[in-house]
Amino acid sequence: MKALVLAKAGEIAIEDVQLAEALGPDDVQIKIHSVGICGSDVHYYQHGRIGPFVVNAPMVLGHEASGVVLATGKNVTHLSAGDRVCMEPGIPDLNSAQTRAGIYNLDPAVRFWATPPVHGCLRETVIHPAAFTFKLPDNVSFAEGAMVEPLAIGMQAATKAGIKPGDIALVIGAGPIGVVTALAALAGGCSDVIICDLFDEKLAVAASYEGLHAVNIKTGDLARKVAALTSGNGADVVFECSGAKPAIATLAEHAAPGATAVLVGMPIDAAPLDIVAAQAKEITFKTIFRYANMYPRTLRLLSSGKLRVQPLISQTYKFSDSVAAFERAAAGHASDIKIMLEME
């Protein structure tokens, strides 16, 4: 079948591949329809590695996907051929201590699409465990289904934050993860979410949502905006989604006393933190790594209309134009939030 293959840093192409996959009794075979390009895909394309994960052999890219079920294993009862689905890309060891504890995203043995040496889903068909395959509601499109994966990260962050109805949140970073985290915070009960970044083009997309207040860190007065919305108290929840060292270092600045800070973005290397400033406000720090058990609730929110992601899809390319799509993503246009690929 045809697949988008990363040979090494800077070298991708659509190729014919033959992968050793067989439909097991608990699996489904899926014809891929839509795949979102993630920042990690672009990073592998540009650098051939992310931390300890190195592309040492040709690898199929992609992990944000939706499609149509072609066949089901004999033990699968909740899905049928023809069902429209989205797939959770991380497959844990179902017998691990972490999986049994409900934190399967932290299983050290998890196999995640397009994380070396595991092939991704930018190909015509995949075989995937039915337990990590979810039927799309009738009013959720394939493109929205592919967006469930990044949305699940925002949902994990909002859930970890323990949001109370009426809380005011600050999101640092208006990239794809920052915006979906802000939307998840609104869906989770925040009355208002301030989102800040350096690029007006990204902030304009965020500002189109009711309840999101966009501030340019360079040209706007973030402190004044936070003070105005919180009566000078500071944000109840701070989500750090940029991974930028200066943002992490000053995380406590705009937080309310007793606030919760959730670290979502990943810095390239060790980042400083003003511990004394955080202690003076008794800030509770939490971290997230991907997500667990977030797909069903994310799909319910999409179906209800309480999460809207269509405005975040900046460009859509056909699979035959995948190389051009990755070149566009790698160029880092400030106006781009999510680039989507459609199989033909």
Image (cartoon, grey):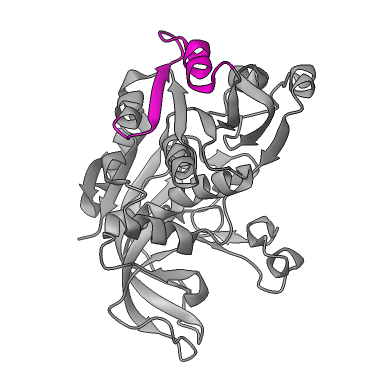
Residue 250, x across and y down, in percent: 64, 17
Residue pictured at 46% horizontal, 14% vertical:
217
Residue 210 is one of the magenta-drawn residues: yes
The answer to which image quadrant residue 82 occupies is: bottom left
- The residue shown at (72%, 63%) is 98
Q: Position of residue 6 (x, y in %)?
A: 42, 48
Let me know if residue 320 appears in the view: yes
In this rendering, position of residue 162 left or right of residue 202: right
What is the magenta range? 208-232
- From this view, report whether residue 219 is shown above or below residue 182: above
Task: Looking at the picture, tell me which residue is in the foreground, 179 or 117.
Answer: 179
| Residue at 39% in and 31% down | 212
Which residue is depicted at the point 67% across and 64% down?
102
* Location of the N terminus (image quadrant): bottom left
Q: Residue 316, image x and y in percent?
A: 23, 45
- Residue 113 spot, x, y in % from top left: 50, 58
Which quarter shows the C terminus? bottom left
Compare residues 197 and 16 and report the one nearer the observer. 197
- Kindly tell me whether residue 121 is visible in this rendering: no
Q: Quadrant of residue 123?
A: bottom left
* 192 versus 103 height, above or below: above
In the shown orientation, is residue 200 left or right of residue 190? left
Seen in the image, is 311 located left or right of residue 244?
left
State yes or no: residue 255 in magenta: no
122, 224: nearer the viewer: 224
Q: Reply above or below: 309 against 221.
A: below
